[in-house]
Amino acid sequence: MSGIRRVLATDIDGTLVGFGGENDLADYLARRSDIGVIYLTGRTRHNAEGLIHRHNLPGPVALVTDTGAEVYWGRELRADDRWAFQQRKDWSPRRVQDALTSVPGVSYAGRSSHWRLAYRVESEDGLSSARTHLIRAGVPARTLWDPADGRLDVIPRGALKGRALRYVLQNLRITAHHCFVAGDAENDSDMLQGRYQGVLVANGSAELTLHLSDRIYRANYPGAQGVLEGLRRWLKDDAARPLASPPGFVS
Ligand SMILES: [Mg+2]
């Protein structure tokens, strides 16, 4: 890990995989041992691990799962207990269920992990009632709304990719300057609005493009090819700048 001088911090679905070009990106990253990869995904660890292997993507420097609720370190995926403890402190799936149990137009659709409860919501009214009920019940949680699917996910308040990324970079002692972010959707927005340079792939959410910082490049290509396009552009600029001393890493 000592040869790593910069990192690619990237979402998985719709960004790294799903639009072709995955092999080209995997080959490129395999040749660039100076670039470490931090994966940040809404998936569970098991799910994310499977996808990374299937597409021959590099082993992670860190893997952030469940939209930021869990952090795992290195290829061996050591769980970060300190981070998990912080997330657990105010996360109560039972309280979420109690708060939403009798909201009209809102029905429980199951739990994909300890960190995510899904609800079917029939209308905009149902959506705002669900949010109001959570607030009134004093349940500290965040909601993710997928209008195409009529699905509302409830996740821990502190489960944010951007927040987890800051924590990971601090631990690795990598500055924002040496981190390049990549994403496509709403749950990447706090990474893409941060202090980092990065790329929004061409298939990225139209709404997201309205709120991007000017450090984020809009790729011409979707998915992995868009990440590669953005990354190459960034590295070309970066090569012209003097490199800071190599960042330190926690073992
Ligand atoms: Mg995505």
Image (spheres, rainbow, N blue to C red):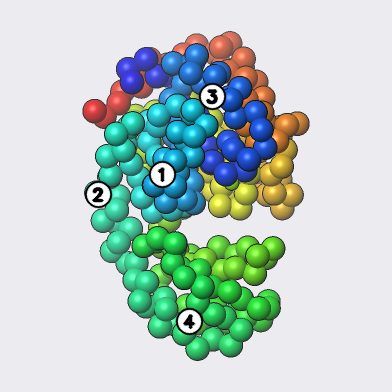
Task: Give the alpha-carbon distance from disc 4 to disc 1, as whole Å.
Answer: 28 Å
Sort mark 2 into few (<14), some (14-19) or many (20+) by Cα contacts within 10 Å. Answer: few
Question: Residue visible at 61% across and 53% down?
Answer: 186
Task: Give the alpha-carbon distance from disc 1 to disc 3, as whole Å.
Answer: 19 Å
- Mark 1 belongs to which amino acid? Val
Which numbered dot is residue 236? none
What residue is disc 3 on? 26
> Where in the figure is residue 130, as x and y percent of width and height?
55, 79
Closer to the camera in the image, 219 or 58: 58
Q: Which mark sits nearer the N-terminus, 1 or 3?
A: 3
Task: Give the alpha-carbon distance from disc 2 to disc 4, as whole Å.
Answer: 30 Å
What residue is disc 4 on? 100
- Mark 4 belongs to which amino acid? Leu
What residue is disc 2 on? 82
SS class, disc 2 = helix
SS class, disc 4 = helix
Task: Give the alpha-carbon distance from disc 4 to disc 3, as whole Å.
Answer: 43 Å
> Where in the figure is residue 169, as x and y percent of width and height?
39, 35
Q: Farthest residue in the front direction?
A: 54
